[in-house]
Amino acid sequence: MGQKKYISQRTRTTHTYSFYRQRRNDPNWRADYLEARTQRQRHILFTLIIILALMLFGVIGYGKRATSLLDRSSQSSQSTAVENTSRQDSNTSSTNQTVTSEHRSTEDTQKTVVVNNYQRYSIYSGEYGSETQTYSLDFSSGKLLTTGPQKQQIFYFDKVMVHPDKSLVINMHGNYHYNAYDGKGEHIKLVYLSVLFAPHERKITKNWQTGESIEDMTNTVVNRFSIALSNDGGKVFQMAPAYAAFATNQTAGDSLALIYSEAN
C-alpha cells in the first residue's frame, strides 16, 4: 500500500509527507509542510481512536461472554445443587410422611371413632331374641324395633361409634309406650338409650367410658348386645350396666324391663 499524499496549496500537486518534511525549512514549501503535518496528525489520531474503540468493544464483548459463561456455569451448579437438595427433601418428606402416616394409623387404632356411614355395618342387622322379647336391629334404616308383651317400640339411631376392640356403641332415642299402674292407660316417655354391640368373634376388652379393663364372658360365636340408659336427655349414658352384662354373661336378659322400671 502506497504512502498517503497531501495536496500542495501552492502547486496544486500531491506529494508524500516525506517530501514536505524534507522541505520544511524552505519558505516556499513551509506552509504546505505545516498543512500536511496537521492532516497527518489528525489521520494518526483518528486511526488510534478507531483502534482503541475496537479494542474496548472487544474487551467488553469478551468480558460479557466470559460473565455469561460463568453465570451459566454457576446457574447449572446451583440448579444441580437445588435439584439434589430437592430430591433429598422429597425423600426426607416422603419418609416423614410415611412415618407420620404409620404413627397416625397406630394412633387411630387406639381411638374411638364416630361412624357416619353406619349402613356399612348392615351385616349385623337382624333379629336378636331374649327371654321375653325380640329385638330387630336394622343398620340400613338406623332403627331398633322391639316386640314383646308391651307395644312395639321404635328407637332411632342418633350416633354410632366404634371402639378399638371393634365393639359398637349406638346411641338412640324413641318414644317408649307403656301402661303405668295408675289406671290411666297408655303412657309415652321420650327415652334415650345406648346399645353396646359386640360382633361375633370379637370380645369387649375395656369399659371405654371409664377406661377399666373387663373380661368378656359372653359367647363370641354370635353377635351380642346390651342396653344402657341416659338420665340427662342423651348427653351422658350410664354404660356401667351394659359393660357389666358382658362381664357377667347377661346380654340375653330382659333389657327393656330396665327401661320400664325407669319409666315408672
Image (cartoon, helix red, strand yellow):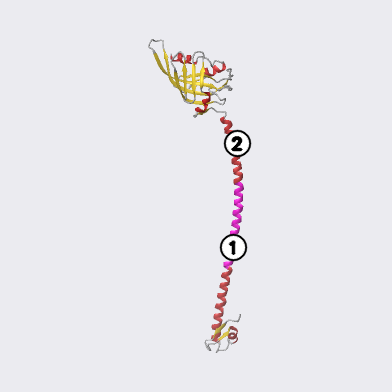
Q: Position of residue 203 (x, y in %)?
A: 58, 21
Magenta range is 56-85
Residue 33 position, x and y percent, is 56, 85
Image quadrant of residue 102? top right
Residue 249 spot, x, y in % from top left? 56, 16
226 or 88: which is nearer to us?
Answer: 226
The verdict on residue 79 being magenta is yes
Q: Magenta residues: mostly which secondary structure?
A: helix
How many numbered tags mark residues here?
Answer: 2
Give the amino acid type for the residue marked by disc 2 in the picture: Val
Crowding at mark 2 (Cα within 10 Å: few <14, some 14-19, many 20+): few
Asked whether residue 232 appears in the rendered view, the answer is: no
96 is higher (above) or lower (below) than 220: below
Quadrant assignment for the C terminus? top left
Give the quarter of the image for residue 20: bottom right
Specify the label residue 63 is tagged with.
Answer: 1
Outermost residue, left side:
184
Expressed as whole percent of the image width and height from the top left, the position of residue 49 reads 56, 72
Depth order, front residue of 262/42: 262
User: Which mark's residue is nearer the viewer, 2 or 1?
Assistant: 2
Q: Can residue 144 be seen in this view?
A: yes
Q: Which label is found at residue 18?
A: none
The N terminus: image quadrant: bottom right
Q: In which quarter of the image is residue 74?
A: bottom right
Q: What element carries label 1?
A: helix
Q: Mark 2 points at which residue?
A: 99
Q: Which residue is drawn at 57% across and 74% down?
A: 48
